[in-house]
Amino acid sequence: MGLRNGIGGLAAALLLLLALPGCSRPERETAGVLGPKGPQLLRALIVPQPGSLLPHEGTYYVEGQLSDAIFNNLVCANHMGSLAPELAENWEVSPDHRQYTFHLRRGVRFHDGRPFTAADVVFTLENLIEKSRGKFAEIEYIDGYEDFLARRTSHVRGIRMLDEHTVQVRLNSGFKFFLPFLAAEYAAIVPAAFAGKSEEDFRWHPLGTGPYRLARTGTRTVDARQYLVFSLEKNRTYFAATGNVDAIDLYTTNTSIDSASTRHFDLLFISDSEMPELSGRPEFKILNSSPSILNFLVLNPGENDWMSRVEVRQLVYFAINREKLVREVFHNQAMPAHSMIPFGLLGHNPYYRLDYARAAAIRATLPPGRISFTLLTVAKDRRGQVGEFVRRELARFDIDVKVITMDDQYDYFTRRIYDTDASVVMGGIPDYPSSFHFLSHLVEPNGYYNIRRFSLPALQASIKTLPSLDTVNEARVLAEISASCEREALYVPLYHYSNFVAIRDRIRSISFKYGEVADLARLEVIE
């Protein structure tokens, strides 16, 4: 969805490094400004404000960005999704992919000084099972999951602490996407028993092992606008190499970015709508992460009699020219999406293209006369323009679309899409870092991308067989899932997109991780 636009983030070791020349310094508020030879402070701006700093409760991109700075995972994923060690120095996987033995890094400490041990891993995984309750399909593969949730056991039998630096996890069946899930933001390691804090206290005063610690949170006013600010300070005992940024003040707001206030910031997480103005200002450089956000329509078969007909939904699916959309609306700064199968899954064919001529053939089988429905979208990130493009494309097939746009992105993604009867435009994303997670939540009854709560038992059954150790069979299942999505035409893929960041010249280099998260730990600034 536009959630985690997202939506979330990961730790990573392998980096896509972009060297950026320049030496000018940004304008700053006078209070607390440090000279060029002192500690390096950056000010960043991101929308919206986070709803929680507990990793497993993350919903928005800002939460992933904060989680990545404060916490670590057992394993990490680079911008391509390749895995590498992090808190686990190494691991062994049994031939049947049912048993994972993790050997933990020694000498790591949480931000309050307590040592990191296997007990923290056990607590994190058991807490994730208890609190998520069906949110993550991947964790249901751990042996003893159901007995633990049903309170038949006090611990998950498939999670064992062999010693202070060794943890073994046993699954109830072979599942080769378990390691990618452990690299996800949701599985970031928290201290056992939340380091003695209540869960509510930890939610806003977290302790991790990450490259930055949360020093304080408070409100600040800049140009008459109030922000919730999270002050991050460098973890001086961090176990990995870091850049030369000593502190980051992350300003957050639930309203759109005020262009007049951008002069106060070094790093801005911007939307497509803010990009044109900032790209024309010489003090900023605009960078984008790899295009992994999948934006798509959700068709509501309950809206009217027309939409309940699968032929009409298929007509919508095949009538929208994705190449034309990318060319006319995004000026080729996006990628056409022809399938709901994400890039990250083996078997996805990046050369597959829809047969747009099928739209005319389908229309010929339908009764003459106008077809009509409503389409709700948000104006931000050119989604309003996408809605208008869809309206024009469908008009060629005697379909009248009433496009309703909202300016409040936060309200749209947190409330309106759940209580509207219209068809909905929303962004989805191959999740962190396993795309299996994205697909499962499109079809699971309580999946958080399945906002219409579609009943899709056949698709659900197919996706549950997806983590196959048989590569040939997995490719076949993926092809069947893709064909099923086209037949049902409840989800209509449109385009892949990426997030943008605007940076000042004083930032010498910046890296992106999987899930489009900027690697704050490796930031380099000109001193």
Image (cartoon, rainbow, N blue to C red):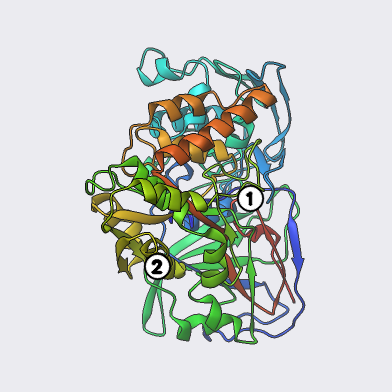
Quadrant showing the C terminus: bottom right
Residue 266 appears in the figure = yes
Tell me: 399 left or right of 65: left
User: In this view of the protein, can residue 204 be seen by the observer?
Assistant: no
Q: Which mark is residue 34?
A: none
Residue 416 appears left or right of 514: left
Q: Which residue is mark 2?
A: 392
**Distance from Cα at disc 2 to Cα at disc 1:** 35 Å
The nearer-to-camera label among 2 and 1 is 2
Percent position of residue 362, x then y: 41, 47
Q: Residues within 10 Å of mark 2 (few under 14, many from 20)?
A: some
x, y percentage for residue 264?
A: 53, 82
The residue at the point 46 percent across, 24 percent down is 461
Front residue of 330/182: it is 330
Question: Where residue 488 appears, x then y in whole percent?
Answer: 40, 38
**In the rendered view, does 289 fall on the left or right side of 299?**
right
385 over 207 or under it: above or below: below
* Kind of element beneath mark 2: helix
Q: Secondary structure at mark 1?
A: loop
Identified at 47% across, 34% down, the residue is 484
Q: Position of residue 66 (x, y in %)?
A: 52, 55
Up the image or down, 468 lies above or below 392; here it is above
Which residue in the rendered view is the most extreme toward the top? 152
Q: Amino acid at mark 2?
A: Arg
Residue drawn at (63%, 40%), measured in percent from left and top?
Answer: 348
Residue toward you, 329 or 118: 329
Which mark, residue 514? 1
Name which residue type carries label 1.
Tyr
- The answer to the question of whether label 2 and label 1 lie on touching residues, with beta carbons closer than 8 A, is no
Q: As displayed, is residue 469 above or below residue 236?
A: above
Earlier in the chain: of badge 2 and badge 1, it is 2
**In-front residue for pair 238/90:** 90
